[in-house]
Amino acid sequence: MTRKLLTGNGAAAWGARLAQADYIPAFPITPQTEIIEDISIWIDKGEMDARMVTLESEHSMITAAGSAASSGVRVFTATSSQGLLYGMEMIYTVAGWRAPFVMINVSRGLSSPITLESDHNDIMAARDSGFLQIHCATCQEITDSVLMAYRLAEHKEVRVPAIVNLDGFYLSFTREPVSLPDADKAAAFVGEFDPENLQFKGSTPLSQAMAVLGGGPYSYFRYEMHLAVERALSVYDEIADEFADTFGRRYDMIDNYQMEDAEYVFVMIGSFATKARDAVDSLRKAGWKVGLARLRIFRPFPKERIQQLLKGRRAIAVIDQNISMGMGGVLHSEFATALYGMNDAPAVLASFIGGLGGRDISQQEFFEMINELKQACDKGISPPPRLIYTQNELTEIRKLQAIAQVEHAEIHQK
Amino acid sequence: MIKESPVHFHRMKDMPSSHLLGTGTPMCAGCGALEALHNMYDILGEKTVFVNAAGCMTLLSVYPFTPFRGGWLYTAMASAPAGAQGVRDAMDILLEKKKLSKEDNMEVVVLTGDGSAYGMGLSATSGAMDRNLDFIYLCYDNEGYGNTGQQYSAATPHAAITSTSKGSHGYPGFKKDLFSIWAAHHPAYVATIIAAEPLDLAKKIEKLQTMKGPRMLIALAPCPTGWDYDPKLSVEIGRLAVQTGVWPLKEYIDGKVVHTKIPRQRKPVEEYLKLQGRFKHLFDPQRDEQGIAEIQARIDAYWDNVTE
């Protein structure tokens, strides 16, 4: 084991190196690019035995990732935001090939307006694809999750690709100390890639990804994929146990903080959960029984685990760093689905949308959320969804609009 | 890469007498694309992985049946060359690591229609050539989006009636010169072929088997349903495409374009046009002398510049 100060991107690249990925189809996009730069340097120096190819788009990159995995090698790739969406046709397609590989997504808000900074709308767009999704909050977790993701994706009961998600800027460019597992130990944990029947050989006829005619065969293969993704839940615990035994770090499906006696619970994914942790500490000091549940595995959705965890709590604040236009937070809907009709379900399930396009969620805002939960409990009704935005921010945007209007008027006068 | 020992195709009787591709596929009767694929597959042999883009040929492999004796991977409309990249690279990695025997190595062949090759898939094709990918690319060109009912594509010839150019003058645009676009990338090999000239086709496949890198083929694929003619005329229309000079048979190697069959006495283009319903408006209800002359003039202008 060595300790290194790594960015989230660096930690992701180390995950690929330690998993002994054979093949890295790549395409640059901010804020992911450092991952493929690190890997290319290692390959050039002979420190990593892999082949890297830069494709001409993410659509092609994901195609090549899927086709290489379908031809019997271990594949790693990475993208972000617009790139993920540009490749989205192939995200769905290669998942259906049942070709296991691991892809990093460095979360970044989606156009329009175009931005570089982080939120989760990109990764939510891949929600229904058949890719597994693991969401990280620290750099250590990124390296470790890549290793676990290979085990999960390649498991004979699962066999679908996996995305390991990290937040752009907040994690991608933040340096944290990371304990890197010894190469031998990591290789032993991940194991050799067993392509099973996924390999083109001159001596073995094999047609893959064929068309189907009619809803019967189509539904069969789609249901098969759904059931395989669901099986990743039971497999996950085995892998997490083995990881903890081997490396001494435990990653449960849900990362719980101060949950034992918590009456009010923050629910979220990703690195902003570290901000919520601080808020929980402050609120606890002030006498509030507050906890934090950070979902690490989002697909498959650990519904039963969530039900067990939230049963009997007073109120839940689901914080979404995404927005489904005309509906609200995606995570909130999913939690409502998990909790609806459950005995002893929390009376209040409130939705807060914040942290879009890299916007911070301040400590004060976390406190306000708990305040809202308390009031909602007193009234006995869940509050309407809140779009977190301050008066100051509104003033700032009004100033920008005023400048734009002045400029516009001046141009027209000329 | 293991190459099969060369077969020498001098005469028609040197050609394979039985087909490798299985029968009973759902292609239309008289499909010029299927015939080109037959001819090509017979020579390439079963150690071939076809990486397919969305098009008519996607329906060759419908679960659980396949006419292919080797490999098949359907990708999507835009990215079959990238699919080929992944397969080729994976095989090379496995060969290097001795996880795949040389005997088990396969030739990777992209199979796409003109809709993909001339349009949506052009960027991926360009990228594969940039990367000098060792693969074969077959575009079966039936001059329109055939699988969806023959809407015009960038491969549609001037004046052709298609489902989206039904007006009295047909398609106003001109067929894109994909051969030259490909050749500008300086790949190992570019050639035009047609199933109606099987010996020319066979010689080209034989030649490209001795090469590495991107080996690019465009097969003009007479299409009874899309071009509106009796399926029994497919071979005749194919031959006329060559004899009238509509479809020049040529190849690009080492920076040079050479024509492999120069029709010294070119037949008038109307012999080719009048057999096809898509050009009927040039002859009926009255002959469009100017329209036919314009098409003829463009063909003549092409051949005026051809010396070899």
Image (spheres, grey):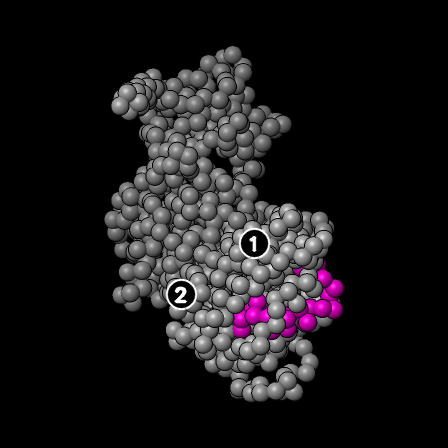
Q: Given the image, what chain letter belongs to the residue carrying mark 2? A: B
**Sequence-earlier tag: 1 or 2:** 1
Q: Quadrant of the N terminus of chain A?
A: bottom left
* Secondary structure under the numbered disc 1 in the rendered image: loop
Residue numbers of the magenta segment: B223-249
For the residue pair A42 and B1, the one nearer the viewer reads as B1
Q: Amino acid at mark 2?
A: Ala
Residue at horizontal 33 percent and vertical 52 percent from the top: A35
The residue that label 1 is drawn on is B153
Residue B171 locus on image (x, y percent): 59, 52
Specify whether A315 is left or right of B227: left
* Secondary structure under the numbered disc 2 in the rendered image: loop
The CA distance from mark 1 to mark 2 is 21 Å
Query: Is residue B241 inside the magenta stretch?
Result: yes
Residue B239 locus on image (x, y percent): 64, 73
Residue at horizontal 53 percent and vertical 63 percent from the top: B297
Residue at horizontal 50 percent and vertical 70 percent from the top: B303
The residue that label 2 is drawn on is B184
Q: Amino acid at mark 1?
A: Ser
Residue B117 locus on image (x, y percent): 52, 59
Dot 2 crowding, Cα within 10 Å, few <14, some 14–19, many 20+: few
Residue A294 vs A197, above or below: the answer is: above
Query: Is residue A310 inside the magenta stretch?
Result: no
For the residue pair B142 and A177, the one nearer the viewer reads as B142
Do the residues at pointers 1 and 2 share their chain? yes
For the residue pair B141 and B57, the one nearer the viewer reads as B141
